[in-house]
Amino acid sequence: MKAYVVEQYGKDAALTEKDVTLGQTGNYDLKIKVEGTSLNPLDTKMFFGHVAAAPVTGILQGDVTGTIIEIGESVTSFSVGDHVIAFGGGLGNRSGALAEEMLVPEQMAVLRPDNLDIAAAGCLPVISLTAMEVLKERAAVQSGMRLYVAGGTGGVGHLVGQLAKHYGCDVTASASSDEKATWLEQHGIRPHRYRDESAEQLLARHGHDGFDVIIDTVGGDHLQESFILAKERGKIISIATRTTQDLTPMHSKALTLEAVFVALPLLKGKEQEMLRQQEHLAEVAQLVADGVIDLVIEEQVPRQLDALNAAYQTFDQRSHFGKVSII
């Protein structure tokens, strides 16, 4: 089959087109004809050698939607011909979706709702699993909680803010432009123009002592700002903690800081955690299909070598508004 392969990860990494052979379908595997996928920060970090979890096959991207063309002998939940969505590889010993076919574990796949198009389906897995782990497993969200989302219109950020609103939370999120601030307001989320208003000024304007939970999807100095925005004994949940920061402000407010790495269950074969992720993905996919949650796709990249290489080279150089789809 044709695949786009990274032969050497690092600063000079590039995708090349090759004919490869997919491994044997395992007992609990689904073989999928790939129809859609998307680009995530995890992919580019592995591409450039910043995260030591890259697939040994050189075939990246864990997000996938497609049609099942073969099932393992122990698979019971799916049949050949089913249309599915999954986060199923692109790291460790598992090849990803930059190929004509992909093997994914049965536990990481869900049926694609009939009214969910391919582009949207291919964008959902990583951001859905991340957002749901943050909200349901780490924050234990309840109606009335005050949440702040750093990076409120990024891939994870625009989803987590809407889901938090759906669960009854009072949500504020950062925005870097009028367009992004307007989008947040239209979705019931208070925008924070952080370039024009400091964290202290925001709290003074809102008239409260801080947020119950800070969801940091950006990292870097935004994490430092989170220490100001959190209330005493508040919680900060970050998906971007590969940074060096002064943690002193955490002590005076008795804050909790937690890191989320959504790929850990798949990478380590943690079956029960994978099954929880399966439930999370099914819930979010249905919410998007029903129009309850709005998925933003800022760009569609064709599955062509030059276009893919350009997308990988430029992805980390700009601020994103939603997702980059590849179909």
Image (tube, helix red, strand yellow):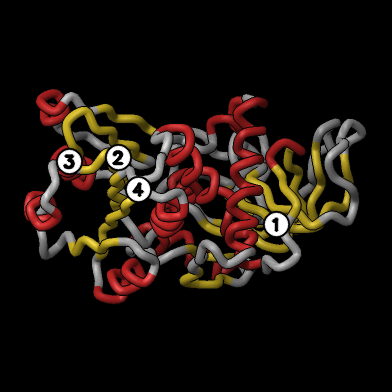
Q: Secondary structure at mark 1?
A: strand
Residue corresponding to mark 1:
65
| Figure quadrant of the N terminus | bottom right
**Residue at the location (43% across, 61% down)?**
313
Disc 3 marks a residue whose amino acid type is Gln
Which secondary structure, mark 3? Answer: helix
Task: Check whether the beta carbons of the residues at disc 1 and disc 3 lie within 8 A of each other.
Answer: no
Q: Residues within 10 Å of mark 4 (few under 14, many from 20)?
A: many
SS type, badge 2: strand
Give the image location of residue 187, x and y in percent: 39, 67
Task: Indicate whether 152 appears above or below 140.
Answer: below
At mark 4, the secondary structure is loop
Is tag 1's residue or tag 2's residue first in the polypeptide sequence? 1
Residue that appears at 57% across and 67% down: 291
Distance (Cα) linking label 4 and label 1: 24 Å
Which residue corresponds to mark 4? 217
Amino acid type, callout 2: Val
Q: Residues within 10 Å of mark 2 (few under 14, many from 20)?
A: many
The residue depicted at 34 percent of the width and 30 percent of the height is: 258
Q: Of the residues under marks 3 and 4, which one precedes in the sequence?
A: 4
Which one is in front in this view, the residue at disc 2 or the one at disc 3? 2
Q: Is residue 131 above or below residue 293?
A: above
- Is residue 59 visible in the rendered structure shown here? no
Q: Quickly name the residue at label 2.
A: 213
Q: Picture coordinates of residue 206 (x, y %)? A: 14, 55
Residue under pointer 3? 224
Q: Which amino acid does the dot numbered 1 rest on?
A: Thr
Which tag, 2 or 3, sits closer to the chain's start?
Answer: 2
